[in-house]
Image: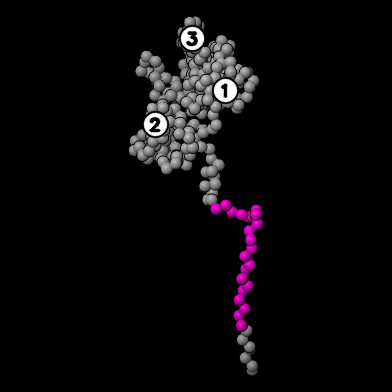
């Protein structure tokens, strides 16, 4: 019997390399890097001009200070999950943890410090056409204080903020913390609309205080015990009100 002829093994054909289609092109950046590029950046807020924002090695004041950010530093990125009001951030070569109260969205802002009341937008103007001052952001306010501000602006149009969150602020002449310290108070420039806005607040704002200052067009509103204190006029607190 004749032995079967040996058959030489034929190598499998080498797959041809195909050029990726334009749709299949993969970015060299990692998914984390791609997502981070689309994330918003922040600026340092609520820090006095002669002070700094401490960057710490962990999410509380018990951790060491490892860097400092100057007031109004811009381009700060939150690079992870925040914990108990503290966020991990990156700013240039500095990275660590900062208190979220001292960060505001880094958006184009128009300086309003020199705007006169008559130069302010009229009722019905789009609020998006101008921005809050960098040292008085609304982003740090509590949800209740921000909702009150939105009610006022929905009724009377945009207002120029003068003061919002001021950590550690005290009520003048006392050792008691101001509502500004907790993000529960707003001072704003009312201009020619002052009397109209005050009248509306007295009638409609009962979840906190309304106060005006002598010889100023500012109005102070806050969230907390109800009171009204009008410079040179009426004054009452909720427990004394008829």
Question: Could you tell me how far apart the alpha carbons at marks 2 and 3 are, in whole angstroms?
Answer: 33 Å
Q: Residues within 10 Å of mark 3 (few under 14, many from 20)?
A: few
Q: Which residues are magenta?
A: 8-28
Q: Is residue 178 above or below residue 61?
A: above
Q: Is residue 147 above or below residue 107?
A: above
Classify mark 3: helix, strand or loop: loop
Q: Nearer the viewer, mark 1 or mark 2?
A: 2
Classify mark 2: helix, strand or loop: loop
Q: Residue at x 34, y 38 (%)?
A: 64
Reading the image, the residue beneath label 3 is: 215
Q: Residues within 10 Å of mark 1 (few under 14, many from 20)?
A: some
Q: Residue at x 63, y 61 (%)?
A: 19
Compare marks 1 and 3 and give the one earlier in the sequence.
1
Q: Is residue 14 magenta?
A: yes
The residue lying toward the viewer, choosing from 238 and 142, is 142
Q: Are marks 2 and 3 in contact (CB under 8 Å)?
A: no
Reading the image, the residue beneath label 2 is: 52
Compare marks 1 and 2 and give the one earlier in the sequence.
2
Q: Residue at x 58, y 21 (%)?
A: 158
Residue 53: quarter of image: top left
Question: Which dot marks residue 188?
Answer: none
């Amino acid at each position: 019997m004749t032995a079967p002829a040996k058959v030489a093994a034929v190598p499998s054909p080498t797959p041809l390399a195909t050029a990726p289609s334009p749709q299949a092109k993969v970015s060299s950046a990692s998914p984390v890097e791609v997502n981070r590029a689309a994330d918003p950046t922040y600026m340092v807020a609520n820090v006095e001009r002669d002070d700094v924002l401490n960057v710490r090695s962990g999410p509380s004041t018990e951790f060491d200070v490892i860097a400092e950010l100057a007031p109004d530093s811009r381009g700060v990125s939150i690079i992870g999950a925040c914990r108990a009001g503290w966020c991990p951030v990156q700013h240039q070569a500095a990275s660590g943890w900062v208190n979220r109260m001292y960060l505001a969205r880094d958006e184009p802002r128009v300086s309003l410090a020199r705007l006169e009341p008559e130069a302010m937008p009229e009722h019905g103007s789009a609020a998006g056409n101008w921005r809050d001052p960098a040292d008085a952001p609304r982003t740090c306010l509590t949800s209740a204080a921000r909702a009150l501000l939105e009610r006022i602006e929905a009724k009377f149009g945009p207002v120029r903020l003068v003061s919002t969150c001021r950590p550690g602020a005290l009520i003048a002449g006392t050792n008691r913390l101001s509502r500004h310290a907790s993000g529960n108070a707003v001072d704003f420039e009312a201009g020619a609309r002052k009397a109209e806005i005050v009248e509306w607040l007295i009638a409609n704002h009962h979840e906190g205080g309304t106060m005006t200052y002598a010889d100023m067009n500012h109005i102070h509103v806050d969230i907390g015990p109800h009171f009204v204190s009008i410079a040179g006029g009426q004054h009452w607190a909720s427990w004394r009100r008829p």
